[in-house]
Amino acid sequence: MIRIMFDEFFATAKPMRRAAGQNVFRQGMPVTRLYRVTSGRVRLLRHLAEGTAVTVALAEDGETIAEASLFTERYHCDAFAETACELAAIPAAAIRNRLAADARAGVQLAALFAGQVRDLRARLEMRNIRGASERLLAWLRYNARGKPPQIALQRSWRSVASEIGLTPEATYRALTELQRTGFIDRRARSVTLRSGKG
Amino acid sequence: MIRIMFDEFFATAKPMRRAAGQNVFRQGMPVTRLYRVTSGRVRLLRHLAEGTAVTVALAEDGETIAEASLFTERYHCDAFAETACELAAIPAAAIRNRLAADARAGVQLAALFAGQVRDLRARLEMRNIRGASERLLAWLRYNARGKPPQIALQRSWRSVASEIGLTPEATYRALTELQRTGFIDRRARSVTLRSGKG
DNA sequence: CGTCCGCTTGACTCAGATCAAACTTGGTGG
DNA sequence: CCACCAAGTTTGATCTGAGTCAAGCGGACG
């Protein structure tokens, strides 16, 4: 119910495509649109003095980019397609109008962002776990649902690997290890967490 | 101007203390207060089935905890003092009332959270940089201001180390390395970024 | 004056990255 | 239905760079 507001806009958004390397928006340009990545990968780069740049985010899979731009005049970073991609674009003005017209919209948006903050904090915290198996286990626990806790992965383990900051190889090995030590029960992309050991 | 709203509440908040190991709130309890950590460190733990738990965040230094709780009935995690700490507490109802009364408050809050989202994404992205020197350099670039870009650190390098996910030793070595290769110019806690190499 | 903590440097270790090769799966098109 | 290709998965061997332990310096503070 919380992300309804955004989704509603994106549902009717006009889709657009970008070839690999093409630009979506540039730092310093007035904020005209909000984007969601439908497929492919978009890199957000913040330019600094001296011609250097820092990657600020990598978006794929339905992630929305530069939401913070809603509240600023100009984009604070460049966005360019790293692979060929498809994006949904909505005019920033539409959201701003909604925010001005509907008092509850602001609160809804705040709730949406607050949830993202919580989620990002959790992800960041997982990165502090050094051991590959332990980090993966933390991720599994965080994302498992039900009793007993289970995960039916809708994507590749590779993508999980990149989310938790491990190489695919390390992730597969960690899976094997967790299986071996009896922490999980796995069949392909389905995992069941087990109480303690095996 | 954006974080005025929160700060205003926290400024008049009653301070409270917790000894190391003491509880602040528990998962499942109705959300009554919002907290900001003034000193010390608070660990947020999310309990899962099977008696296991995952650390969801570690807050210190003036960080606000469990903002997302503003929009839920009950706390979704435990909070307990990891060291002796001091907290500022404000009633959640106060914020909710403000949100209900002032239409612009919701938007302000959304803007605040959106900024946090951007910041957390950037931090997460830095963690994907493997090399210690490169990661530290990215952090320095992200946090430097001015022309030429400079940083006058107000805290210890140790705390920077933990923020970027390196050991203090690795961080000091990276500093030395960046100095040696001419990327930075350092005197104690003041750093100037230099164009390319030395 | 002594203690604590941040800083610094050195030596060693090891877990995860990297490189490599094979197998499986899934989808595409003939 | 099969040939084929791309991507994901799996396992092995090797290497490297950050973690760990250790030791010493110096400034802040009681």
Image (cartoon, coloured by chain):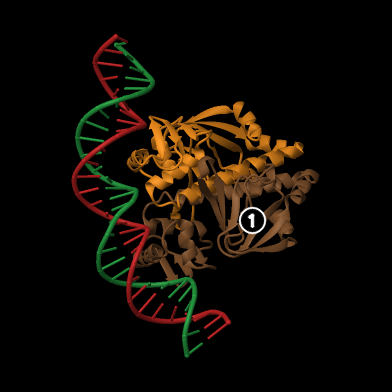
Chain colours: A orange, B brown, C green, D red
Residue B152 appears left or right of A171 = right
How many numbered markers are drawn? 1
Q: Position of residue A160 (x, y in %)?
A: 43, 38
Q: Is residue B181 above or below residue A104?
A: below
| Chain under callout 1 | B
**Res. A75 in view:** no
Q: A157 and B180: which one is in front?
A: A157
Q: Position of residue A187 (x, y in %)?
A: 38, 29
Residue B43 appears left or right of B15 = left
Q: A102 and A190: which one is in front?
A: A190
Q: Position of residue A119 (x, y in %)?
A: 55, 44
Q: Amino acid at mark 1?
A: Val
Pointer 1 residue: B24
Q: Quadrant of residue B103?
A: top right
Q: D19 and B107: which one is in front?
A: D19
Q: Which residue is at a point 73% across and 60% down the rendered structure image?
A: B13
Q: Which residue is at a point 77% across and 51% down the rendered structure image?
A: B94
Q: Position of residue A58 (x, y in %)?
A: 47, 42
Q: Is residue A118 above or below residue B167?
A: above
